[in-house]
Amino acid sequence: MIEKAVGFEPFYDKGSKVLILGSFPSVKSRQVEFYYGNPQNRFWRVLAEFFGETAPAEVRDKKQFLLNHNIALWDMVTECEIKGSMDSGIKNYKVADIENLLQKISVRLIILNGGKAYEIFSKHYPRIGAKYIKLPSTSPANTHFAKEEWFEALSRVFKRA
């Protein structure tokens, strides 16, 4: 069944140094009302391992983790028609206003979490004035995930624990 869905507001504060952009929240994320809500998604485990911490489980702990480490989150798609959680199911979408967000925070690096986020970002922001990198999706659907690529990218801005 195709549903009309709305994503989340960007999560950030003035100290955000890295902006991580996904494509659109999964069904599970929309149920828990925060980013990367599917426990099978590697996102929280990878970040926690990089910083030498335990992966946060509760939404309030995830928010505090992001604030503690100066990480902002958003998705490239703010609303769309979608079937399930797969990026291939995203249709008739609205794109996030990344330029407006970047006026509020001075990030040193934008990380694009997966191919769909990168595809949309590249199409709509070909001349953005910030460094960015495409990384393998943390989604459980991605069988070619390599956390070392995430660690290397994060090391450009943060010290690894």
Image (spheres, grey):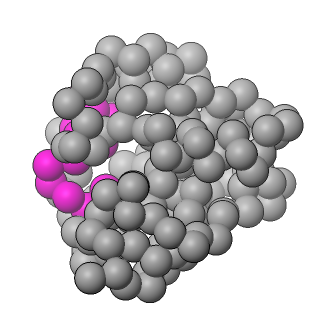
Instruction: Give the image location of residue 87, x and y in percent.
Output: 39, 55
The residue shown at (29%, 63%) is 85
Residue at image x 65%, y 30%?
A: 132
Check the picture and name the quadrant holding the C terminus: top left
Q: Is residue 133 left or right of residue 58?
A: right
13 to 71, vertically: above or below: below
The spot of residue 45 in percent (x, y) is 22, 38
* Observer-nearest of 154 and 5: 5
Q: Quadrant of residue 18?
A: top right
In this rendering, the answer to whether 41 lies above or below 149 is below
Q: Position of residue 6 (x, y in %)?
A: 48, 80
Question: In this orientation, which residue lies closer to the viewer: 155 or 77?
Answer: 77
In this orientation, which residue lies closer to the viewer: 36 or 107?
36
In the rendered view, tell whether residue 132 sits above or below residue 121: above
In this rendering, position of residue 113 left or right of residue 70: left
The quarter holding residue 74 reads: bottom right
Q: Quadrant of the N terminus?
A: bottom left
Residue visible at 57% across and 73% down in the picture: 92
Provide the residue span drawn in magenta.
36-49
Q: Position of residue 34 (x, y in %)?
A: 36, 68
Q: Is 131 on the left-hand or right-hand side of 64? A: right
